[in-house]
Image (cartoon, grey):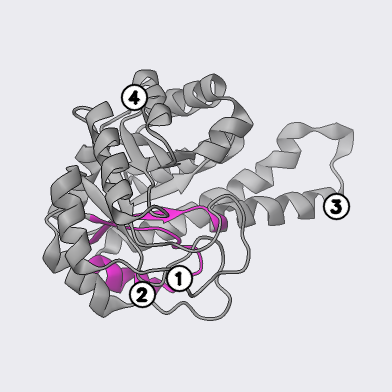
Amino acid sequence: MLVAGSELLQRAVREGNAVGSFNTYNLEITRAIVAAAEACQAPLMLAVGSGALHYGGFGVLSALVLAAAHEARVPVAVHLDHSPDVETVRHCVAAGFTSLMIDGSTLPLAENIALTRAAVQAAPGLAVEGELGGVAGDEEASGAQHTDVPMTDPGQAQAFVRETGVASLAVAIGNAHGFYKGEPRLDFERLAAVRAAVPVPLVLHGASGIPDADLRRAIALGVRKINVNTETRYALFTALQASLREGVPGYDVTRLFGPAMAAMQASVEQKLRVFREGA
């Protein structure tokens, strides 16, 4: 069933765990994510980024994801991920998205606050997520990560939340989009300081490749939403490559994508189990 993103965040706060947000680009990924949620009886967010909307076509992909959420046997929010502008936020509000993220993290603080405040005003009654600090890497493709990006400052975070009215805050504590080069090193002291400074749930992007123990520790320190993209895509590509090497008789699309969907579902289920364990 389609639900508000705020409902899932509030549930995570009550239960002391984290809601999973998984990016989708097409029918097969969407079905695999929803199947995992139903198998685990876990709520989640179906996340759609600007790149995915451009790839799939706004109307087509939006309709597909919203239909999947409506038909799901567990609570599912449809989330706009990393919107660079308020216009996209308005389109998604009109389409029926129930959760939104505006990403002004590359802007100077004052401009980030102004952009984020405008997004909150464009989505009355909906949970809007902002981001402060820099999360390295590309959300759409894996690659080298950088260590020279700014992390979230607790004092700035307090002012950012107060002046924008966001419902949740994505933090930068050493996390990165894509798989990590070497072992991830998260700044848990910084995370705890941000948690103490702001009254809203915290969000961790770039969870692919972070050890389960670190994810559990982040949840214990106030992270209530965790984003996953690369690990799902890795499962898709690995399974598709294996199917193509082995050969698919009769150009059977269902037999080609079936193993890939099963692999993605297993990947999402594993994450959901960790996120639901909480602290």
The span picked out in magenta is 202-230
Q: Helix or strand or loop: what does disc 4 sit on?
A: helix
- Amino acid type, mark 2: Asp
Task: Give the camera-side residue of 270 and 83.
Answer: 83
Element class at badge 1: loop
Q: Nearer the viewer, mark 3 or mark 2?
A: 2
Label ID, residue 93:
4
| Residue at image location 16% in from the left, 47% down from the top | 163
| Residue 140 spot, x, y in % from top left | 58, 49
**Marks 1/4: CA–CA distance:** 32 Å
Which residue is denoted by mark 3 in the rendering? Answer: 246
Tell me if I can see residue 279 in this picture.
no
Image-based side of 201 in relation to 137, left or right: left
Helix, strand or loop at disc 2? helix
Q: Quadrant of the C terminus?
A: bottom left
For disc 2, the marked residue is 214
